[in-house]
Amino acid sequence: MKELVVVAIGGNSIIKDNASQSIAHQEQAVQEVAAHISDMVAEGYNIVLTHGNGPQVGLDLRRAEVAHVQEGLPLTPLANCVADTQGGIGYLIQQALTNQLRVQQNKQAITIISQVEVNKNDPNFVSPTKPIGAFFSEKEMVQLQQENPQWHFVEDSGRGYRRVVASPIPQHVIESKAIKSLSECGYVVIAVGGGGIPVIKNEHGNYQSVDAVIDKDLSSTLLAKELHADILIITTGVEKVCIHFGKPEQKALGETSVEEMTQYMHEGHFPPGSMLPKIEASLSFLAAGGKRVIITTPEKLASALKGETGTHIVA
């Protein structure tokens, strides 16, 4: 039985900076990702790929905001923006991967538009803190608030007002059974883009979307658990996780145990806004029965899976 690997790619791996926002630039970045994933398939692994969408959903929202202000067109709900980016990014990755796999492995990639259930009583809904979209003047903010009374805004360091939404904890990937079936049939599956489309169950037991953003690493970890994956790979901007980061005694971590990583976490080595959530997600996956977590850059995916680089946390 082939080992199942869930690979989480950041949205910033596809839009690397403000000069790389065009579809042509994104296609080029995706070609690089596809080459690394194809190498992993060639090594005999089943792959499920997840991706972020921060820069892309920001662009989607901004287009909708500009069209609303200048042309009076209706605003696009946040859940639809997440769905749009799942389709758009998924299509780019799917095409690039299928082109690579068709020649090398006689395999295909497929994208699943993925919904992720959250708890409607999640405390994050009471105090939303996740900024999305553009900066607005006070006048624009007041107008948008009147048009959308349920929206929340915060003033951001003198730069203007930004909308904030909740970032609830993911509870269940609705399409996980379909993802597992497709993976077992040999497809490379692209799923849970942007952390998934957040949905809740209404009073009739039906799913409905909510304005929220789910952390991509948390959703990827949840999916890995629900698929009973063997390995979770989280890509980031560094080849290896470091302790004493930025200090003379800085040390890059190779293979480490759950106990060691837990100790480093409690000692405060990992910043809350960047590496800490990835470490917490990693330990959660291993506690649920996963064998290994690898943290590295997208460029080092294949070599990290061979054990040549990256930080490896083992159960």
Image: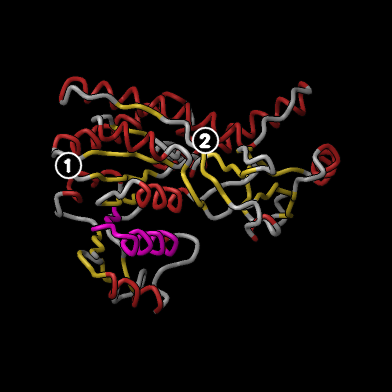
Residue that badge 1 annotates: 2
- Residue 3 x %, y %: 19, 45
In the image, which residues are magenta? Answer: 276-296
- Horizontal side, residue 173 vs residue 99: left or right: right
User: Which residue is disc 2 drawn over?
Assistant: 56
Nearer the camera: disc 1 or disc 2: 1
> Between 58 and 202, which is closer to the camera in this rendering?
202
Asked which secondary structure carries label 2, the reply is helix
- Residue 110 coordinates in the image, percent (x, y): 35, 27
Name the amino acid, label 1: Lys
Q: Is residue 13 above or below residue 120?
A: above
**204 relative position to 168: left or right:** right
Q: Check residue 294 for magenta coloring.
A: yes
Task: Please state, as top left, top right, bottom left or bottom right, where the N terminus lies in the image.
Answer: top left
Give the crowd class for mark 2: few <14, some 14-19, many >=20 residues within 10 Å. Answer: many
The reply to whether dot 1 and dot 2 touch (C-beta < 8 Å) is: no
Relative placement, left or right, of 93 versus 207 is: left
- Mark 1: which secondary structure? loop
Q: Which mark is residue 262?
A: none
> From the viewer's perspective, is residue 267 above or below residue 172?
below
Height in image: 263 above or below 165? Answer: below
**Residue at image coords 60%, 31%:** 80
Q: In the image, residue 47 lies at what x, y percent?
A: 27, 39
Q: Identify which amino acid the numbered label 2 is placed on.
A: Gln
Q: Residues within 10 Å of mark 1 (few under 14, many from 20)?
A: few
Q: Residue at x 19, y 39 (%)?
A: 40
Locate residue 169: give its quadrant: bottom right
Front-most of 236 and 106? Answer: 106
Q: Nearer the viewer, residue 90 or 32?
A: 90
Q: Residue at x 74, y 43 (%)?
A: 136
Number of labels in the image equals 2
